[in-house]
């Protein structure tokens, strides 16, 4: 890979494979405009935008946003071209000062004008991984990286890498409570958002191991009077867990009384969704569904004879050794619980961080846990302590369809450098979390944050290094 010209920290535009196509030229020109002022950037956008693109967002607004973005990351260095066609190009690029990697795609219309683009944080290319990946090297790299993200205002939370139950590295940034400047540690409690769906899947998995439930059982087996006939007769437990049952959401339907006083049983949520018509015939499509997981939690109650929160405490948290975790089905004011911060308001984004509404837990997510406890949870899943290895393999196997093809049973499945990584993320105002388990290895990565959309960059770097470390161990290039 070529290096940037001396004195130019903003853009390096000569990369092998960056074809001399119109979209390739647009990428190069955009990188050059990164060092321009907003007025020059606006003139450039005016010249290259299609009419439709200009209607969606004006050249002035694009230039203003892009100028801020370029300054935040110190400009960009191109890494590699991942796709090059006459009207489309996708490239990997990294912030010169932030070290955050992005995959950027430009699409042109038939007239060669810019039509639309995507720009998303992505896993660093494997070739960019450090050659030294000892425990100390991983900890040092994460310390530097998290410090940069925190300084940018892009992170507040903790990143933990573990080998089995042993913590390899644990790095925090920001505060659990900003006004009190409370430090974040491995025992700091976070609301998890949808990461908690994995607890529901593990609960069902335990009942499968006990032969009280099968993933192929129909909803009607447990709720013969379930109001919607299609869901009752055609939706299976596996479909509920894999978001292929056709159910939708229910979180916005929760009442003020629920949010204030809490909910004791998963079955209490059923009136919020049980009369909804499915979005599609069960088993034919994929659509993310909080209601599906809520119904799976109600099945846990029906079969076990225990309220869902009590089931979690007794059969998930206690068994896995998760001493600082809670179902969060009733509002808590724990001393070690973080304050969630958001910029989302009913009137758009705020310029300042505001305390977010505190969530309550359900089988769809929202439980409370810590980085240390989630390491124990991952190890308990991996080792067969919570569910049999056969059932965990089934949970971590793709069961989704279409855009959800790489989704298992309440488990997201990623391919990182040729290795399978499974887990789940969670997002809610003031909540951004992720748990990753590197299959075929003893490694786990936990990222918990208490502000909007803050886990992605830290998680991608931590997972990348961890997967690379596991690959080196597998080839005996490095010891544990």
Image: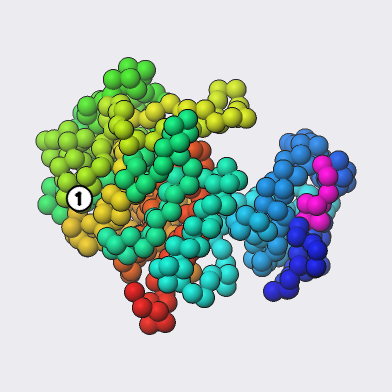
Magenta run includes residue 32: yes
Which x, y percent locates residue 216? 24, 50
- Measured as percent of width and height from the top left, residue 141 is found at 50, 63
Secondary structure beneath label 1: loop
Depth check, front residue: 47 or 470: 470
Which of the image's four quarters has the N terminus? Answer: bottom right
* Residue identified by numbered label 1: 321
In the image, what residue occupies the spot 26% across and 41% down? 325
Residue at image x 30%, y 55%?
375
State left or right for residue 345 relative to residue 80: left
Place of residue 282 in the rendered image (x, y in percent of width and height, measured from the top left): 36, 43
- Which residue sits furthest top? 257
407 or 352: which is nearer to us?
352
- The boundaries of the magenta stretch are 31-38
Residue 34, given in percent of the width and then of the height, sits at 78, 51
> At 31% across and 42% down in the image, what residue appears?
369
Q: Quadrant of residue 263?
A: top left
Q: Is residue 3 left or right of residue 362?
A: right
């Amino acid at each position: 890979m070529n290096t940037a010209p001396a004195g130019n920290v903003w853009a390096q535009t000569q990369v092998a494979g960056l074809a001399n196509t119109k979209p390739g030229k647009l990428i190069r020109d955009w990188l050059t405009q990164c060092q321009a002022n907003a007025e020059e950037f606006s003139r450039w956008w005016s010249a290259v935008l299609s009419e439709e693109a200009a209607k969606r967002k004006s050249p002035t607004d694009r230039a203003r946003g892009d100028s801020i973005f370029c300054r935040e990351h110190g400009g960009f260095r191109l890494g590699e071209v991942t796709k090059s066609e006459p009207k489309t190009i996708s490239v990997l690029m990294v912030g010169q000062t932030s070290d955050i990697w992005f995959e950027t795609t430009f699409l042109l219309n038939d007239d060669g004008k810019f039509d639309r683009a995507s720009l998303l944080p992505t896993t660093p290319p494997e070739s960019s991984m450090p050659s030294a990946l000892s425990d100390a090297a991983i900890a040092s790299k994460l310390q530097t990286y998290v410090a940069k993200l925190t300084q940018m205002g892009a992170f507040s939370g903790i990143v933990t890498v573990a080998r089995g139950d042993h913590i390899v590295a644990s790095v925090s940034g920001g505060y659990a409570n900003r006004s009190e400047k409370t430090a974040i540690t491995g025992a700091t409690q976070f609301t998890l958002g949808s990461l908690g769906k994995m607890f529901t899947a593990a609960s069902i998995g335990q009942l499968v191991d006990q032969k009280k439930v099968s993933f192929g059982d129909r909803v009607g087996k447990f709720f013969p009077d379930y109001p919607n006939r299609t869901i009752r007769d055609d939706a299976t437990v596996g479909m509920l867990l894999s978001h292929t049952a056709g159910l939708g959401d229910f979180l916005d339907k929760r009442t003020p009384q629920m949010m204030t006083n809490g909910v004791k049983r998963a079955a209490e949520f059923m009136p919020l969704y049980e009369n909804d018509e499915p979005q599609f015939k069960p088993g034919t499509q994929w659509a993310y569904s909080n209601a599906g997981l809520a119904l799976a939690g109600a099945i846990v109650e029906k079969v076990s004879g225990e309220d869902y929160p009590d089931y979690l405490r007794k059969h998930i948290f206690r068994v896995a050794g998760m001493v600082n975790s809670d179902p969060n089905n009733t509002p808590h004011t724990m001393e070690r619980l973080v304050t969630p911060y958001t910029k989302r308001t009913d009137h758009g984004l705020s310029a300042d961080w505001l305390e977010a509404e505190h969530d309550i837990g359900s089988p769809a997510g929202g439980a409370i846990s810590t980085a240390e406890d989630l390491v124990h949870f991952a190890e308990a899943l991996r080792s067969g302590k919570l569910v049999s290895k056969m059932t965990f393999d089934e949970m971590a196997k793709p069961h989704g369809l279409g855009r959800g093809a790489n989704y298992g049973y309440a488990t997201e499945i990623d391919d990182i450098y040729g290795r399978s990584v499974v887990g789940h993320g969670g997002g809610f105002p003031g909540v951004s979390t992720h748990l990753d388990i590197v299959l075929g290895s003893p490694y786990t990565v936990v990222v918990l944050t208490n502000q909007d959309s803050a886990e992605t960059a830290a998680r991608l770097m931590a997972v990348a290094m961890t997967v690379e470390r596991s690959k080196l161990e597998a080839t005996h290039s490095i010891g544990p």
